[in-house]
Image (cartoon, rainbow, N blue to C red):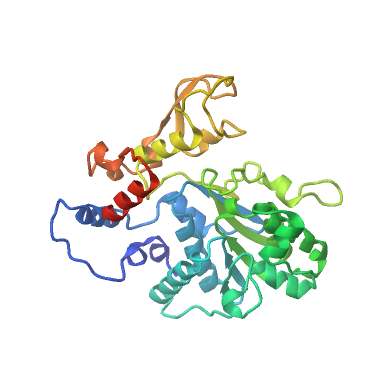
Amino acid sequence: MTLSAIQNLSSIRKSRSKREVQRSDSRGAKLKRLEDSIATLDPRQNKAVLETVEGVQRIRGLAGSGKTIVLALKAAYLHTRYPDWRIAVTFNTRSLKAQFRRLITRFCIERSGEEPDWTKIRIINAWGAPGGAARDGLYYEYCCTTGATFFDFRNASSTFGGDEKAFDGACRNALQHAANAADLYDVILLDEAQDLPPNFLKLCYAMLTPEKRLVYAYDELQNLSGTSLPPPEEIFGKDETGKPLVTFGDDDRRDLILQKCYRNSRPVLVSAHSLGFGMYRNVPQNARTGLVQMFDDPMLWEEIGYTVKHGQLAKGQPVALELIPESSPIFLEIHSDIDDIVEFIKFDNESQQNVWLVQQI
């Protein structure tokens, strides 16, 4: 498998149905020009695919930075290079299963001429349940292998609490049998880690061979529970001497950041962040700001592509931030007027909003 084969995304990004552009000024024509502009991996994406280390690897990036594609390509790359390795690709959203299978299959066929060996590479849900391969999951497989009690969502909710507490508690309970789970996989690649509990990452870690090749990707700003993923030292714990089992330090091979967002332009990203954090929200009575949430570590703003325009990036200090041009390709924002990229429309009720949305599709 050549480097150019890995870098080339044109075949992966192609739509399965061929559509002819009728008007050069239509949104469809603009979309096609944008897709044609993203034909190869950028250097950071390419590094994330090729960089293979023993131990845990973290990939961070905003929505649209290519995390899912990078994980799919990495899975295919490792599968073709090490065909005897047992590889698992897991995630939170069930609909990703078909997308991963399509991406991995297409990449393997077009670059090596062969279908993936699905006995060696598994695309598998995080939780899972009894009922055959279609419903299988890493947590369910772990329980079957180790003899740990399996909890479905209803039982986990009643035992450990609802929402994210359910799966976290189920995984925490299962980890009591971790010694029996080793050597199930050579590599596990985990997408959407921000939506999965830290104990699930520990469970994946326990299922690996001694090399502990776990690759997890997540977005600090796109989690469902409202909490950030803890640092690796906290997630994976310590050994018997008190030393962290996993630490990244300054090793950029283990902690990769995909800074460029290809799905959304800077105006869309900044608008979404402003609304999500309550930047311009009216200050409630007896409150200092209108913020509804904020990073514990202010430096995360720089890691996701912002720079200080003026002020100080520190807790309790006023600051103005600007999203750098390198964080999103300029062609994502110059194809249309700003009023066409970001629209603010007021509705009297939810029904009006739904009607308008349907009409725009």
In the visual, does 111 lie left or right of 256? left
Residue 166, percent across and down? 69, 57
Looking at the rendering, which quadrant does residue 82 occupy? bottom right
Q: Split into 4 quadrants, where in the image is the N terminus?
A: bottom left
In the visual, does 17 lie left or right of 173? left
The residue sitting at 54% across, 79% down in the picture is 118
Q: Is residue 170 above or below residue 137?
A: above
Q: Is residue 256 visible?
A: yes
The residue sitting at 45% across, 55% down in the picture is 46
The residue sitting at 66% across, 76% down in the picture is 130
**Most extreme residue toward the right, as rendered?**
240
Looking at the rendering, which quadrant does residue 171 occupy? bottom right
Closest to the observer, 211 or 107: 107
Q: Is residue 232 above or below residue 316?
A: below
Q: Split into 4 quadrants, where in the image is the C terminus?
A: bottom left
Closest to the observer, 241 or 291: 291
In the visual, does 23 lie left or right of 242? left
Residue 63, percent across and down? 45, 49
Looking at the rendering, which quadrant does residue 180 occupy? bottom right
Q: Is residue 76 above or below residue 335?
A: below
Residue 81, percent across and down? 53, 71
Q: Is residue 210 visible?
A: no
The residue sitting at 33% across, 44% down in the picture is 329
Q: Is residue 213 above or below residue 102?
A: above
